[in-house]
Amino acid sequence: MAELILILGGTRSGKSTLAEHMAHERGGDDVLFVATAQAFDDEMRERITAHQLSRPSAWRTLEAPLQLATALQTAPLANTVVVDCITLLAACRREGIISPKLRHNSPFLVPSVVSGSHQAQEFHVLIVSWPVRCAGA
């Protein structure tokens, strides 16, 4: 069985905590945590450190701020994958922080990349995001 869960919420609303709780329920210690945040200032460094300390030590962490799909293709298998936060990845793309030659590597390849690696297994993918409103909408 494959399960894809999208967790939406505002800044500091508990999205990551909920994702961690749900991941632990589903995968126990067999969790791959994919972190997309980059520490551009002291506040973000503190938030990243707090998030790192809140996760179980048995979980594997994959830092993938730029090339998410590529990173997932080479990541160790896990029954549960948390991607936190897809919005940060998209924002970096929008602001040009990511090189234009990498833009073809869509963050929305997550389900296909993960499912391709886990065809014969039960697995869970939890994606954390902020609700985004487009200009003019």
Image (tube, rainbow, N blue to C red):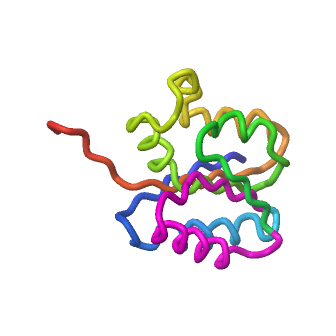
Residue drawn 74% across and 59% down?
61
Relative to 135, 113 lies left or right: right
Q: Which residues are magenta?
A: 31-58
User: Residue 118 placed where, x, y %?
Assistant: 80, 41
Q: Is residue 74 above or below residue 40?
A: above
Residue drawn 44% across and 48% down?
87
Q: Is residue 47 magenta?
A: yes
User: Residue 58 placed where, x, y %?
Assistant: 83, 71
Q: Is residue 132 magenta?
A: no
Q: Is residue 107 above or below residue 7?
A: above
Extreme residue in the left direction: 136
Residue drawn 57% across and 66% down?
19
Q: Quadrant of residue 35?
A: bottom right
Work out which quarter of the rendered image holds the C terminus and state it: top left
User: Residue 74 placed where, x, y %?
Assistant: 81, 38
* Number of marks drawn: 0
Residue drawn 67% across and 78% down?
53
Relative to 61, 129 lies left or right: left
Extreme residue in the front direction: 41
Q: Quadrant of residue 49?
A: bottom right
User: Residue 123 placed where, x, y %?
Assistant: 74, 51
